Image: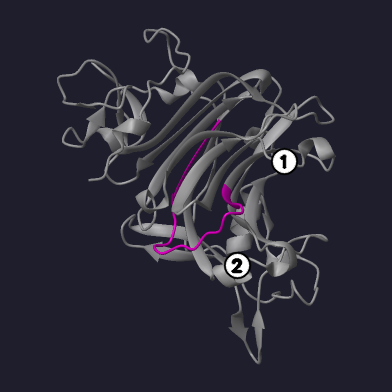
Amino acid sequence: MRTHPHLLSILLLPLVPLSAPAVSPATHSLKADGTTETYRLISEAGFYTETSANMSPDAFMGHQHYNHISQIHDPSLDGYVFAFDIHIDYPEGDTHVTDGNKGTLIDRQRNEIKCMSSQPATVAKSGETITYTWKFMLPEGMLTTSAFCHIHQIKGMGDSQAVAHPVFTLTCRTSGKRQVLQCINVPYEGASNVNLAQIDLSTVTGRWIQARETFTVGRHGQYSLTLTDALTGAMIMNVDKSDIEVWRDTDDLSTLRGKWGIYRSLGEGLSLKSQLRSERVLFADFEIRKGDPESSITETPADCRDDNGPAYNLAGQPVDNNYHGIIVRKGIKILNR
């Protein structure tokens, strides 16, 4: 089991007294079922797709007839998951197709889903707190460049320049001679990007990762992200920031939403295309909970009652079942009495 103790930090999420009655916020979910047509399933769950399947029929972006998001059965999770495909020189008839991007920017390619404003339970406005949880698997041998390859973003809503840049990203790239996965914050007031955490990309490729992200929107907001092994619960990345700028100016002060998929640079004049390949990134079990993050602490969730599963305290240190207090098991915080 691979652990990275140098990346672990004490969680400082605001907690209400544990004796207070828990108030469970409404949940909003998207799960593959292997039966419903994929794009309809995504749409009916309140998500919008941006793939080559719904872009203009440009010669470069002309991969119109391939379902870039599909459902496949995954034996390790024993269930159906979403497969997001992005293509470089994909053979189709007598031609080879490279997926493109929406609009006029043809130096990048995109296959994403994003939360919609028509589903207010999936987005967070100024002063609101929201938690996104999901699973993902990056392919072994994934190719990266020094440019961006986002697999998740928190972005403002709208078309203005103020919301053009994401607030937070999970980005795969080559840094020096290393392939890394970075959690990046882009401050609103023009400061340089802030690298909140970085791990070797090999740490997360080829296995299912459980992600849990909570943020409160505000100029003095809060942000936390944990990545754990979805099968063992081992901590991989832990980010926790208070008094951080979680903000973009929008028509209603600020509204932020999540995006997932693969969105990567091809370089100016497609200069990076030769360094990349077609990739398939897997996602599963999206869940959105609107409300205070204290709801993430539970007595004994049904899927975490395996007393033999590894557990960690809030400092990321392994603990046994005699430990009393908040523990993390399978990426979920539990009150262990």
Residue at 75 percent across and 26 percent down: it is 189
Magenta span includes 16: no
200, 205: nearer the viewer: 200
Q: Is residue 94 left or right of residue 292?
A: right
Q: Say few, some or many: other residues with alpha carbon within 10 Å of mark 1 (under 14 / 14 to 19 / 20 or more).
A: some
Where's the C terminus, which quadrant?
top left
- Near-viewer residue (156 or 77): 156
Position of residue 38 measured from the top left corner of the image (x, y, whole percent) = 58, 62
Q: Which residues are magenta?
A: 131-151
Query: In percent of the image, x 63 and y 52: which residue is there?
Result: 113
Front position in the image: 120 or 189: 189
For marks 2 and 1, give the one nearer the viewer. 1
Residue 296 point in image, percent of width and height: 44, 25
140 in the magenta segment:
yes
Percent position of residue 76, x then y: 31, 57
Badges 2 and 1: C-beta atoms under 8 Å apart?
Answer: no
- Which callout, 2 or 1, points at the residue further toward the start of the chain? 2
Residue under label 1? 165
The three-letter code of the residue at mark 2 reads: His
Report the number of numbered marks: 2
Figure quadrant of residue 92: bottom right
Structural crowding at the residue carrying mark 2, measured as other residues with C-alpha within 10 Å and reported as few (<14), some (14–19) or many (≥20): many
Q: Secondary structure at mark 2?
A: loop
Q: Give above or below for 311 relative to 2.
A: above
Q: Is residue 154 left or right of residue 103?
A: left
Q: Residue furthest front?
A: 176
* Gap in angstroms between the C-alphas marked 2 and 1: 25 Å
Q: Amino acid at mark 1?
A: His
Question: Circle 2 sits on which residue?
Answer: 68
